[in-house]
Amino acid sequence: MRIGIIGTGAIGSALAEKLSHAEHQVKVTNTQDFAELSKIAERLGAKAATLKDVVKDVEAIILSIPFKAYKDLPKSLLQDVPQDVIIMDTSNYSPLRDGELPGLGGKTESEYISEILGRPVVKVFNIVLGHTLKHNGKAAGEVGRIAISVAADNDKHKKLAAEIVDQTGFDTVDGGTLTLSWRQEPGTPAFCTELNADELKGALAEAEKGAAPARRDYIIDKLMKAERPPSHEETVALMRLGSSKKSGNREYVKI
C-alpha cells in the first residue's frame, strides 16, 4: 500500500518505521527543513516529501500532528485526493497544549477534524503511547496482544485501518461511528491503558460521556507535578487509575 504520513513525532515515526518494514511504500513530511526531514525519513525506511506531495498518489493518509495544527493545514490539501483514500487521525485534544478551539464544543475530536478537512476520517492509534506503539506490538494470536479501537463512519475505511493496525502488532476493536469516538478520547478507560481486545470492549462500554475531560485534566496535572519523569509502566498505571470510575483513591499512584 502507498501511505503518506504527516507528522514524525512519536506516533508518526513509529508508524512510518513499522509500515515501511511491512513493505508498504511510505513517505513522510513534517515542518522541519527538507534536509533534516530527509535524514528522519531515511532512518525510518521511508521517503521524504513536501506537504503537497505526501498526499499525492497514495492509498492511505495518516495525520499525526498536534490537534491545534489541523486548523492551519492548507484548505486545498486534500482537494485532489480521491474519495476512496483512507484518512486516519491519530491526534488527541489537550486544552493546556492546544488552547480553546472555536467549533470543537459539542463535537467529538474526530468530528471536528473531519469538518476541518472536509473529508471523512478514521479515529485510530490515538489510544496508545508512543512507547507502546514502538515496543509493545505482538504477533497475531500471541497472548497479551494489546488492542486498539477504530472509529469511523465508513465501514470500508474502518476495515482497511484495522488491517494496518494488525500489521503494526495490535488487535482491533470496533469503536463505532465518529459520534461514538468520544469513548476513546483522553480521560476514558480505553485511553492509553494497554488493554487486550476483551478488556478494551469493556472499557469502551464503561466510558461515561462528559466525565472524560475532568479525568484527563487530573492525569495531566499528576504528570506535570511529578517529581521525576514517570516510567512507561507508571504512566500506564496512572492512566488506568485516573480514567476509571472504579478508581477509588486516586492518590495511590505516586510518581
Image: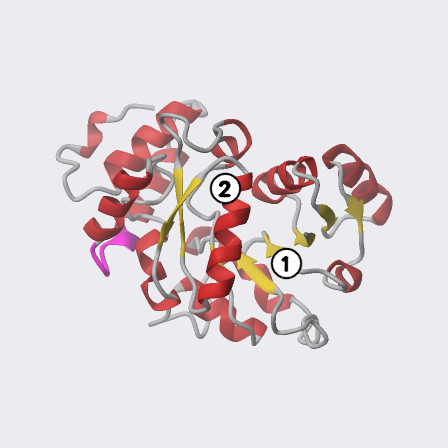
Which of 53 and 74 lies nearest the eye of the viewer?
Answer: 53
Q: How is the image coloured?
A: secondary structure
Q: Residues within 10 Å of mark 2 (few under 14, many from 20)?
A: some
Image position of 224 with respect to 49: above or below: above
Image position of 231 with respect to 61: above or below: above
| Amino acid under disc 2 | Asp
Query: Which x, y percent locates residue 196?
Result: 33, 36
Does 161 lie within the magenta span?
no
Residue drawn at x 66%, y 42% is 16
Q: Is residue 189 left or right of residue 47?
A: left
The stretch in magenta equals 208-214
Residue drawn at x 72%, y 62% is 55
Does 211 lie within the magenta span?
yes
Q: Is residue 254 left or right of residue 61?
A: left
> Which residue matches tag 2?
166
Element type at marker 1?
strand
Image position of 145 with respect to 7: above or below: above
Which of 87 and 232 lies nearest the eye of the viewer?
Answer: 87
Residue drawn at x 34%, y 36% is 193
Mark 1 or mark 2: whose residue is earlier in sequence = 1
> Is residue 90 visible in the rendered structure shown here?
no
> Is residue 157 visible in the rendered structure shown here?
yes
Compute the Cα span from label 1 to label 2: 15 Å
Q: Residues within 10 Å of mark 1 (few under 14, many from 20)?
A: many
Task: Give the quarter of the figure containing the C terminus.
Answer: top left
> Which residue matches tag 1?
60
| Amino acid under disc 1 | Ala
